[in-house]
Amino acid sequence: MELQRILARDTRSAMEQVFNLYGEDAMIVANNRVKGQTEIIVALDLVSEVKAALIKTPEALAEAHDATKFGELIEAHIQGQTEQPAASAASHSDIIFGSAFEPTSPPQATLEMPALDPLVAAPLDSVSKALNGENYKEAADREYLKAREIVDLVKQELSVMRDEFKLSQHKDSWTGRLAVNEEMGPLVEAFNESGMPLGMRESVIEVINQSSSINDAIEQISTAIADEIEHIDLLNNLTGVHIIGGSCGAGKTMMTGRLANQMAQQYGENEVALISFNDARIGAWAQTQLIGSQAGVDTFRANSIEMLMQLIGEMSARKLILIDTSGVSVQSHIDSLCSALPEAQKHLVLAADASESSAKRQLNSDAVQWDSVMLSRFDKEAHPWAIIYLLLQHAIPLSVTGAEPNIIDRAVPVDGFKLAEQALSQLPIQLV
């Protein structure tokens, strides 16, 4: 992405230059006054340079030529890589991530190894085996999925940024201070400083304008959030099969271990089981085993739906079975689990400090009907405005939350009132 600078005598003239040079969809990054002139900074996609650096084949070149967006160009590049199965693992990684890594030796013929018991821990030398070529296809598939995840995240972030810039152009000002009286101005600044989404500020300003004081406005906002966001009492009825989903880094596995530890103390260690389902990330199974050991419950691994159903059938007498899913391809994994286990409850783990785009990516799926949302990293420093904004738009109840990244920290119930209290109590004091 490249930044271009436009100088003109006033804003109107500067915007005309922007539209003439870059079109009506140009992304305005900044608008300032410099030495009596208006300065506008415009962000541009460097499509031509990306093409020259990425396109390697005539087919990929033709496909990238038609791409008008950065996301489309990257997707065309990734698709071109998947059509070359004969490429080496080192080349595949270098093209996607720009790495200078070179393996010590090229992949050799696949070694014939005896099948491992799926319930036994994965061997610690799995990384070296992958480098020797035994799991090359699986490794290549994982690299491709990781690349697609990165592309999707970039596209989501750019989409949210563009929407917010467009919406801000229709406001009286970015901070919204011109839309409220002078007394309420510091409260609006505090909301801006704490990261409240722009789409939510419009509704909040309406409540502020109907309030007599800052304390009255805070109370009304808290009440509105508490009334609109639903919650369920999960901990007092946590039995049966429960599927825990979420993206990588959201604290999904830790939340699963926390619940297993907590329920094992209530039901007994032999009444709770933890299953890791189809998580092919390097070190994922070892991490799940460690967490299960700390929780004091039996831990299993299932790499397919058939194996999972067999495990659940053998443990049907247990009161609680928790299924920890992979953070990659969340949608496809949850879809397959919903088809095989229609009676199981599904819970989405989101970080309390997650951005709007990352949380929206999980909640906007119409194919998955989540039974509840669990919040991780719910500490005093978190400003969960993005979570509040999205839960106000989706009829998904809250269930539990956890703060510390360990299974000793107990999961506690959470509702809309606690969520609002967390956000409103952490407003910047110097501004209010």
Image (spheres, rainbow, N blue to C red):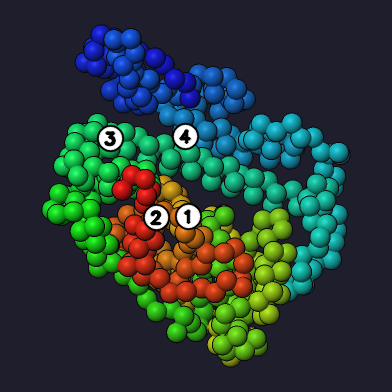
- Given contact means CB atoms under 8 Å apart, are the residues at marks 4 and 2 in contact? no
Mark 4, residue position: 71
| Residue 33 percent coordinates (x, y) | 31, 16
* Residue 350, horizontal then vertical, whole percent: 47, 59
Residue under label 1, please give it. Answer: 381
Check if mark 2's residue and mark 1's residue have beta carbons within 8 Å.
yes
Q: Measured along the vertical axis of the image, is residue 420 above or below residue 19?
A: below
Q: Which of disc 1 and disc 2 is earlier in sequence?
A: 1
- List x then y, in percent, for residue 250: 53, 57
Quick one: 322 or 119, which is closer to the camera? 322
Residue ID for mark 3: 174
Q: Secondary structure at mark 2?
A: loop
How far apart are the alpha carbons under marks 4 and 3? Answer: 28 Å
Say which element carries label 4: helix
- Label 1 SS: loop
The amino acid type, in three-letter code, at marker 4 is Gly
Q: Earlier in the sequence, mark 3 or mark 1?
A: 3
Report the residue at 79% width, 68% height from top.
116
Q: Residue at x 23, y 13 (%)?
A: 10
* Residue drawn at point x = 43 percent, y = 29 percent: 69
Which residue shows up at 74% across the image and 48% down it? 136
- Compared to residue 332, the image places residue 154 above or below, namely above
